[in-house]
Image: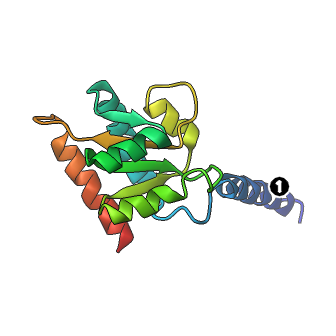
Amino acid sequence: LMWLHPFLFRLISIKKNLCHWCANVNPKAYPLANAHLTKKLLDLVQQSCNYKQLQKGAKDATKTLKRGISEFIVMAADHSPEIILYLPLLCEDKNMPYVFVRSKQALGRACGVSRPVIACSVTIKEGSQLKQQIQSIQQSTERLLV
């Protein structure tokens, strides 16, 4: 019985950490990227920032959608839902792929800023070196919806 106590304590602390990690995520955030896709997304967002193919923030993401120059939209799942509730609806109207990642802080770091970012848009650029990666991400996000 003595050896079981530390094991149970460790199990309970792991469960608390998992619940804390999942607690911030908005249940309406669908499709939510898994860990592997999130890493690919954030890497692509960082590269598109370097190639000047990124618009940061919900307002600028909306502008790129309305102008038709967006490749896809990435949104954070750990924010208040009222702020960007319209963005998935607009993406579906424009037939544009979109995906949620868990952390707005991580999205902000990938966008190259020190502040949290709740939405960003990877934009179209002729002759872009990122075209293959963008198409791969678009296919992955479309598979999440099926």
Q: Secondary structure at mark 1?
A: helix
Q: What residue is pinned by disc 1?
A: 6
- Give the quadrant of the C terminus: bottom left
Residue type pointed to by label 1: Pro
Residue drawn at point x = 51 percent, y = 34 percent: 108
Q: Is residue 105 above or below residue 21?
A: above
Residue drawn at point x = 29 percent, y = 46 percent: 67
* Image x and y of residue 54, in percent: 34, 34
* Image x and y of residue 1, in percent: 89, 66
Residue drawn at point x = 73 percent, y = 60 percent: 15
Which residue is more in the foreground, 122 or 145? 122
Q: Is residue 34 visible?
A: no
Q: Residue furthest left?
A: 127
Q: Is residue 18 visible?
A: yes
Res. 88 image quadrant:
bottom left
Q: Residue furthest right?
A: 2
* Image x and y of residue 115, in percent: 58, 29
* Image x and y of residue 46, in percent: 37, 32
Residue drawn at point x = 48 percent, y = 60 percent: 32
